[in-house]
Amino acid sequence: MKDNQKYIEEFVNNIPFDAPDSRHRNKLKTELLNTFPKHRLQPTVRTVNVWRIIMRSRISKLAAAVVIIIVVGTFLYTHNIVPTAYALQDTIEAYNSIASLHIKISDIVGLETRTDEVWLECDSYGNISRIRYHAPDSGQLGSLTIVESDGKSEAWLPRLNVHLSGYRNLGAILGVDVSQVDPKGLVERLYQQELLGEVILDVNEPVQKDKPIVVTVMYPKGSLSENWKKVLYVDQATKLVKKIEKFELRDSQYQLMETRELFDYNQQIDPAMFSLEGEIPSDAKVIDIIDVEVGLLQGDMTDQEAATEITRQLFEMAIAKDYTRAGQLLIVGPAFLTEQLFEGINLIEITSIEPARPSTDPDEKGFYCSGKVLLESGGLFYVQNVSEVKIRQINTASEPNRWMITGLSGNVYLLPDESFQGFFGFENGLTGWSSFQGSVSVTSDSCTGSQACQIEGRDSEGAANSPYFRVTAGKAYELKSYVKLLSGTGDYMVTIAWLDNVGGLVRYDNDWAGKNRPASYTLHGGTFVAPEGAALCTIMLGVQPGSTYLFDDIEFVPSSEE
Amino acid sequence: MIGGTEKKRTQSQTIMTFSEEENNDLIQRACSDPDAFAQLYLLYYDDVFHYCIRRLFDRHSAEDVTSTIFFKVMHNLSSFDGKVNKFQHWLFRIATNAVNDHLRDAKRRSDAIEKAVTNTRAESDYAIDSNEELLERKAILKKALLSLKPKYQTVITLHFFENMKLIEIAACLGTNPSTVRGWLSRATAKLRKKLDTPMKNRGLRL
């Protein structure tokens, strides 16, 4: 870096630039000063003029006053507002006297709502000094509690019986950005962003004092977060934020993505809340990783390059089974924890990695990356489609400019070799099957062997999807399944959904063709040709509402009649 | 009319003769007193113009953006909080956003590069002390700098032309010094790469 700095210093030395032109300086000064008195004084001048008209006679004074009261009153009543007097600075000021508060953060994850809780204690300037963060469900990690106090942080993961300590900025590493939790910091950022034109604020201050001031935050067209908006509900009396809602525009409609409720302002919090002492069983595994290298150093890479590179490195480390390094890249977990996250999967090779893309969420300064890897499990080969690797920059005093993976999600395609024959007798349960609807289970009422798959459609259809198979367009395949009706009068399906190479639906075959309602196990199926554009397929089993069917000995193989 | 880095340093020193207290007093009065605002404007006009011309490499664009910046300052001065920010940092943050806004549009950006390169000769009229090689170097610098991301352009200009330390740049940009260090490291590496090739092709040396 020093060499580059020196090179540029020498390069720019003595390069001539235009000097300021006094004509422009004077012209602009005149323009500014011409605008200045209007900008500052116009409202006062107008008020004086109106008052002078009113004061001409007692009668006109009275009449005008009545008219003004009626007009203003009607306007306020119909618009349900008073002229806006609220400013964000009022809230920033109000937070200076806050010693503690409690926050509930509800995230919409798919169709579920996940609620985390935060307790904050502030110093005499209103800045956070101690924090407790509790997430009842952190995916594979299970429940998670983080406490930060006196610059130290530790975490407790009961499902894994692991107590993590020695982290620097543990919250950030585990994907919980404390700075984003702090409402004072949030309002201060909004204030600065408004000043710089980075957000558009709309303030609605109702007449009724028991109703909150509603501050709507929009992001300018063309900005990264243009499809997001936030709504802050501010208490009129205290000027403190009571609730924050975050929306994303999807299919032309704003959908609620997150709700934060802030309450118990200045209610004393038990000091024990900011310590994990007494909560951790004596047999918990204590891991102190103060000297562990955190994430990937950015070096000369751009943000996007760093985010893509750390994704590639994570996969490479997992292929090499270097779970120590993989753990450093992924939430700084110890090797055994990282190995558990990979669940014994044998990664073979990286198929592809797409360039990382920035998150559009206004509160997330991170990237998302996607890719595909080939993996082996139980003797079968799969393509893991990693649709969302979540990457964040971790900037702490001791760890500047490092990048960390804070989440992974995706789905798996089964990738048979040439000799593979898909056969599902459900002797090992529902391994490999997914996307369940209704009630899906195994039963001992089987065609052959000891188990079969039972699907019950309740108020809506029941269904299950097989792992994905790789197919060749134009090639014929045979699908067979033994089916038995257990109860109800609805139809069933043993369907093939043909998909393109990224999992998009091309066509269904044999959809709801099961109308025979077999009282005993009966063979259902036939020969099907993969349509143009098909690269993958999945077998879909389904039953109509109110019916229960059993499926067993499902076979999917290339047709021998070709 | 020459305005190189030496001139900038002299002007910074002029500003430094105001104590922080006097400066804050002037800012407070400038919120409601046009004379005080005029004084504040004259105090910072050159700094703002220099920053704009070094970011945009075009006199007319620099003057336009300088005007935008001072109108923003006038409208928002009452919200400036001297307890939280230094005025110069607040001013440069507004300036940086205004310059970046100007460059944001891709078409405008490509126009700016083209304009900057084609204007090299015309600008030599202002640069009476400069020789051919310096003008050649300036043309290379313009093209290279304007092809970087706005944030990299910003840190390069603030560091190498405005002589700001990392902590000051961070205050201007509302980020932390370690982030600025990273940006600067990447920006200098990229800029060097972009400067090296045309210098070698044209047989120029530092």
Image (cartoon, coloured by chain):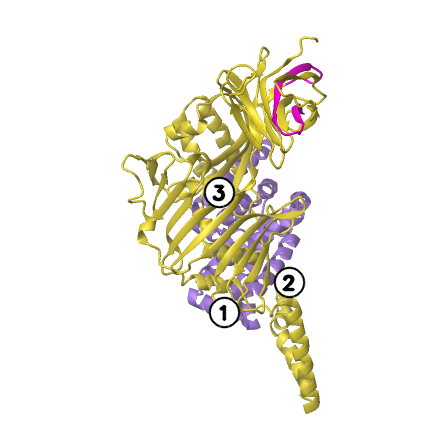
Chain colours: A yellow, B purple
Q: Secondary structure at mark 1?
A: helix
In the rendering, which numbered label is found on residue B28?
Answer: 1
Tell which subunit mark 2 falls on: A
Q: Residues within 10 Å of mark 1 (few under 14, many from 20)?
A: some
The residues colored magenta run A471-498
A153 or A442, nearer to the observer: A442
Magenta stretch secondary structure, dominant: strand
N-term mark: 1 or 3: 1
- Using the numbered discs, state the Cα–Cα distance from disc 1 to disc 3 in whole angstroms: 34 Å
Tell which subunit mark 3 falls on: B
A96 or A508, nearer to the observer: A508
Which marked residue is nearer to the observer: mark 3 or mark 2? 3
- Using the numbered discs, state the Cα–Cα distance from disc 3 to disc 2 in whole angstroms: 35 Å
Identity, as a three-letter code, of the amino acid under mark 1: Gln
Tell which subunit mark 1 falls on: B
Q: Does A357 sit above or below residue A35?
A: above
State the residue at coordinates (36%, 61%): A124
Residue B164 visible? The answer is no
In the rendering, which numbered label is found on residue A23?
Answer: 2
